[in-house]
């Protein structure tokens, strides 16, 4: 189950699998939509349900993301005052019983990541590690042991850098440590170039896109980011999301953790795939059009 | 300009975040022998209160709150030394920091802006603030309120560690503790023994004022 280690010039493919399905993230692939809503953060009722052992909301969220066109599902069970490892493992077992999409296991608790990885059937994406030495040392061995791929954020214990240069330095560090010290393939490292809310800093998206271009050109690795974050605090967030993602894709973003329930955003991404020649001759676009026309009659 | 026009201008220009104009009008007011506290309490603070109210109603958005707060902060920089001379008390002193292990500060910075806008003196310790650093800063600055910010479920437990450190230093009853951040809930704030929680910057200002009012009526100065 090794990932294809790319020839020089060949795009790196991050290969994710469930028991029966494979998804590839790559600079020559259609954009990978990682559905984000299976996450109780900021959802009080969902948290109470999970604390009471009621997992029914998870199934509903999974269904909504899958129907919206998710390729991968991000699963986060960060409920304060619970046994997160146990909860995350149960959620992953449940989700794998209702969908064949690969899973992105999302936690900042190392024990929860391990519990999730051990419960998961297939090749997972782990969300996430930072450039902090302690975090790298705690999480990368798990990624290696369970043959997973890893999302890495170029921030360290001092700050979330606001300059592209510092983000590039930390990206280089992460790639060096992961490949040289832990034997993780470059194809299995997915960098999150850090997308921040435009409402709090008017220059932030330009920095993010510069970071993306340079990561693509200098390292060729795949990238993802929390796309919804960029429109935080602004009105008409869907339109902003539908503009932001295609611009990010042109700068080298190959996947995003996003809410696939919004057709406006999903369709903008699919359209960008056509223009970036990641959807050859627009065949997927045309097929989707036909399916929509057929279901309308 | 008449004093009334200056106050109206300050209110209006702060509301739309016109920082250069707010500073000009502040200077104009001072050169017309208006009292700094008049400019503060009759124009700047009411304007930021209106910003907060519009934000809560969904009529104002984050960037508008941010530029209004910055416009006010510019005027405050000019007024603060004058206010200190005249001995006008601020609404309260608020010590703020993102907890140890956490480097997120966008939300915290928005809260700071709105607190300053409401007339609080804010001392920001930045990110990655260890419990002992909070303790030392409380001893040094003697704030009315200390605010702990956390963005991650893994760093939220630092609230409890900070509160324990305050107890150990004998400071827990000297200061009101507020907590906040994306994953934080009222329930969690209660569980760690914080005095207050708010979901966003505007709500934080209201809660902070209410907590201080309650404290001041309980313990007459």
Image (cartoon, helix red, strand yellow):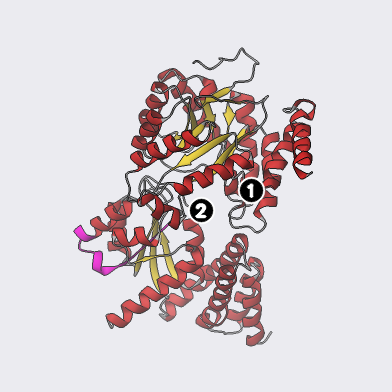
- Rate crowding at label 2 as few (under 14), some (14 to 19) or many (20 or more) other CA atoms within 10 Å: some
Residue A257 position by quadrant: top right
- Looking at the image, is A20 positioned above or below residue B57? above
- Residue A289 is inside the magenta segment: no
Residue A63 position by quadrant: top right
Q: Nearer the viewer, residue A124 or B42?
A: A124
Q: Nearer the viewer, residue A212 or A109?
A: A109
SS type, badge 2? helix
Residue drawn 19% across the image and 58% down it? B168
Residue drawn 43% across the image and 29% down it? A120
Q: Residue A169, position in %: x, y? A: 52, 31
* Badge 2: chain ID: B
Report whether residue A238 is seen.
Answer: yes
Q: Do callouts 2 and 1 mark residues in contact (Cβ within 8 Å)?
A: no
The residue at the far top in this view is A7
Report whether residue A39 is seen.
Answer: no
Left or right of A65 in this view: B139 = left
- Residue B175 is inside the magenta segment: yes
Query: Where is the N terminus of chain B found, in terms of image quarters?
Result: bottom right
Q: Residue B167, position in %: x, y? A: 21, 60
Boundaries of the magenta span: B167-180
Q: Residue B19, position in %: x, y? A: 63, 66
Q: What numbered label is drawn on residue B106? A: 2
Residue drawn 47% across the image and 52% down it? B105
Query: Where is the C terminus of chain B found, in terms of image quarters?
Result: bottom left
The residue at the far front in this view is A297
* Badge 1: chain ID: A
- Rate crowding at label 1 as few (under 14), some (14 to 19) or many (20 or more) other CA atoms within 10 Å: few
Q: Which residue is denoted by mark 1 in the rendering?
A: A203
Q: What numbered label is drawn on residue A222? A: none
Q: Residue A242, position in %: x, y? A: 69, 46
């Amino acid at each position: 189950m090794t990932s294809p280690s790319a020839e020089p010039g060949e795009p790196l493919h991050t290969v994710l699998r469930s028991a029966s399905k494979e998804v590839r993230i790559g600079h020559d692939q259609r954009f990978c939509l990682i559905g984000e809503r299976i996450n109780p953060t900021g959802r009080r009722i969902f948290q109470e349900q999970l604390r009471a052992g009621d997992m029914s909301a998870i199934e509903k969220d999974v269904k909504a993301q899958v129907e919206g066109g998710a390729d991968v599902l991000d699963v986060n069970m960060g409920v304060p005052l619970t046994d997160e490892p146990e909860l995350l493992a149960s959620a992953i077992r449940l989700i794998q019983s209702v969908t064949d999409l690969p899973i992105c296991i999302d936690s900042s608790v190392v024990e929860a990541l391990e519990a999730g990885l051990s419960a998961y059937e297939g090749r997972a994406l782990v969300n996430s590690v930072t450039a902090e030495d302690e975090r790298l040392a705690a999480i990368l061995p798990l990624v290696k042991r369970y043959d997973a791929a890893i999302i890495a954020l170029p921030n360290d214990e001092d700050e979330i850098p606001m300059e592209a240069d510092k983000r590039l330095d930390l990206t280089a560090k992460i790639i060096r440590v992961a490949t040289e010290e832990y034997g993780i393939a470059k194809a299995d490292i997915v960098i999150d170039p850090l997308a921040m809310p435009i409402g709090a800093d008017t220059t932030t998206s330009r920095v993010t896109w510069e970071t993306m271009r340079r990561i693509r050109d200098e390292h060729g690795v795949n990238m993802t980011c929390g796309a919804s974050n960029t429109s935080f605090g602004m009105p008409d967030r869907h339109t902003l999301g539908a503009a932001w993602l295609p611009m990010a894709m042109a700068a080298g973003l190959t996947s995003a953790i996003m809410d696939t329930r919004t057709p406006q955003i999903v369709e903008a991404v699919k359209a960008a795939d056509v223009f970036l020649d990641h959807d050859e001759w627009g065949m997927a676009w045309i097929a989707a059009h036909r399916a929509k026309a057929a279901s309308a009659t | 300009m008449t004093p009334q026009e200056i106050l109206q201008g300050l209110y209006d220009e702060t509301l739309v975040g016109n920082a250069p104009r707010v500073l000009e009008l502040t200077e104009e007011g001072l050169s017309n022998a208006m009292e700094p506290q008049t400019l503060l309490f009759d124009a700047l603070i009411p304007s930021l209160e209106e910003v907060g109210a519009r934000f809560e109603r969904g009529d104002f958005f984050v960037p508008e709150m941010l530029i209004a707060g910055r416009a006010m902060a510019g005027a405050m920089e000019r007024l603060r030394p004058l206010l200190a001379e005249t001995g006008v008390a601020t609404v309260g002193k608020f010590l703020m920091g993102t907890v140890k292990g956490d480097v997120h500060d966008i939300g915290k910075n928005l809260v700071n802006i709105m607190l300053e806008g409401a007339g609080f003196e804010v001392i920001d310790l930045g990110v990655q603030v260890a419990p002992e650093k909070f303790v030392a800063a409380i001893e040094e600055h003697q704030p009315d309120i200390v605010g702990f910010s956390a963005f991650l479920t893994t760093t939220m437990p630092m609230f409890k560690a900070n509160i324990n450190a305050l107890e150990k230093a004998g400071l827990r009853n000297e200061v009101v503790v507020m907590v906040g951040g994306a994953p934080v809930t009222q329930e969690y704030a209660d569980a760690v023994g914080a005095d207050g929680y708010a979901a966003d910057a505007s709500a934080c200002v209201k809660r902070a004022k209410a907590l201080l009012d309650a404290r001041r009526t309980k313990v007459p100065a």
